[in-house]
């Protein structure tokens, strides 16, 4: 199977969060990231643009204790950059997480 998209990360926020999770949750994240890597059309329930954010996307992972969100953006067409992740506890994504994602995206393109 050929990759449609590449995935990497900016800062170590994603790795620290990922390593803090149990193996079952890590496998679920790996499964969703592989859907994003290999599927031409990724269902919105897994990967969705956040309106009003100038290019920030959320990756959605449903787990037994709720949901995990990984915020990301595109670079060079099919390269997805993972920037911050968190356990989502409310209906809306916290404004501080969106602001952080926008700041990290801006830093990434400034470097």
Image (cartoon, rainbow, N blue to C red):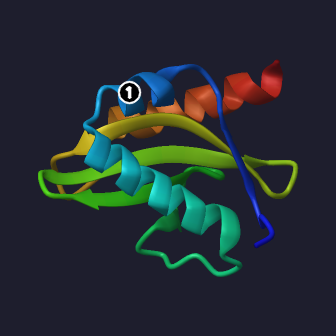
On the image, the x and y values in percent for residue 111 come to 82, 18
On the image, the x and y values in percent for residue 62 come to 27, 61
Q: Is residue 50 visible?
A: no
Look at mark 1 in the image and give the residue it sits on: 19
9 sits left or right of 12 in the view: right
On the image, the x and y values in percent for residue 109 come to 79, 29
At horizontal 12% and vertical 51% (from top left) the residue drawn is 65
Q: Is residue 59 above or below residue 111?
A: below
Task: Say which of 23 and 108 sits in front.
Answer: 23
Hey, which quadrant is residue 83 in on the image? top right
Task: Say which of 86 and 31 sits in front.
Answer: 31
At horizontal 48% and vertical 75% (from top left) the residue drawn is 44
Q: Is residue 56 above or below residue 95?
A: below
45 sits left or right of 64 in the view: right
Task: Say which of 11 and 51 sits in front.
Answer: 11
Rendered-image quadrant of the N terminus: bottom right
At horizontal 56% and vertical 68% (from top left) the residue drawn is 35
At horizontal 44% and vertical 45% (from top left) the residue drawn is 70
Considering the numbered disc 1 on the image, is that residue within a helix, a strand or a loop? Answer: helix
On the image, the x and y values in percent for residue 108 come to 73, 26
């Amino acid at each position: 199977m050929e990759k449609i998209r590449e995935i990497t990360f900016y800062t170590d926020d994603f790795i620290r969060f990922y390593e803090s999770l149990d193996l079952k949750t890590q496998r679920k994240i790996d499964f969703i990231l592989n859907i994003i890597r290999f599927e031409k059309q990724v269902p919105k329930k897994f990967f969705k643009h956040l309106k009003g954010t100038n290019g920030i996307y959320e990756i959605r992972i449903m787990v037994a204790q709720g949901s995990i969100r990984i915020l990301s953006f595109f670079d060079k067409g099919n390269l997805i950059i993972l920037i911050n992740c968190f356990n989502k506890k409310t209906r809306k994504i916290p404004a501080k997480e969106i602001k952080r994602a926008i700041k990290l995206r801006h830093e990434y393109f400034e470097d």
